[in-house]
């Protein structure tokens, strides 16, 4: 891992990844705490993924049972962009939004 010049971020270059393939990863903190990336677009959940049917999510990459614990982040390079199938979307004005906080 590398530390950014302003000391606010760690980063790493990873080479040799296959485009459009999903890779599972976690961070290990203090040598024992396993966590997924909180900014990840996709995470694997050891407690709930088993309830997701292949009809709902075809080809869901499996949670690595027996190899780790807690949430696992998923990284995918060269993803195919999602093509919207609904009409054009107009963002509502901020004053027209209804926001619920729990």
Image (tube, helix red, strand yellow):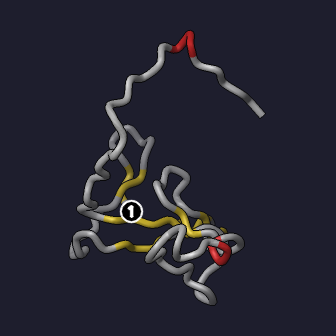
Indicate whether 27 appears above or below 84.
below
Neighbour tally class for label 1: few under 14, some 14-19, many 20 plus, Cα within 10 Å: few
User: Is residue 32 visible to the viewer in this orientation of the structure?
Assistant: no
Is residue 17 rendered to the left or right of residue 8? left
* Label 1 secondary element: loop
User: Residue 8 placed where, x, y %?
Assistant: 45, 41
Write down the quadrant of residue 99 in the picture.
Answer: top right
Farthest bottom residue?
66
Is residue 16 rendered to the left or right of residue 30? left
User: Residue 28 placed where, x, y %?
Assistant: 57, 69
Front residue (pair 66, 85): 85
Front residue (pair 22, 30): 22
Is residue 14 rendered to the left or right of residue 11? left
User: Residue 70 placed where, x, y %?
Assistant: 66, 71
Question: Which residue is rendered at x = 71% and y = 72% of the image?
Answer: 47
Q: Mark 1 — residue?
A: 1
Farthest right residue?
102
Q: Which quadrant, please, contains the N terminus? A: bottom left
Farthest top residue?
95
Indicate whether 87 appears above or below 76.
above
Is residue 26 rendered to the left or right of residue 18? right
Question: Which residue is rendered at x = 35% and y = 46% of the image?
Answer: 4
Question: Which residue is rendered at x = 74% and y = 29% of the image?
Answer: 101
User: Is residue 68 visible to the viewer in this orientation of the structure?
Assistant: yes
Front residue (pair 10, 17): 17
User: Residue 102 placed where, x, y %?
Assistant: 78, 34
Question: Which residue is rendered at x = 46% and y = 74% of the image?
Answer: 58
């Amino acid at each position: 891992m590398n530390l950014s010049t302003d000391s606010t971020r760690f980063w790493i270059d990873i080479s040799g990844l296959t485009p459009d393939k999903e890779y599972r990863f976690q961070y290990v903190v203090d040598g024992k705490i396993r966590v997924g990336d909180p900014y990840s677009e996709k995470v694997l959940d050891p407690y709930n993924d088993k309830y997701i049917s292949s009809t709902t999510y075809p080809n869901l990459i499996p949670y690595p049972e027996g190899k780790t614990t807690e949430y696992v982040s998923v990284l995918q390079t060269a993803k195919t962009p999602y093509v919207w199938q609904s009409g054009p979307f107009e963002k509502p004005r901020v004053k027209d939004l209804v926001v619920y906080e729990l």
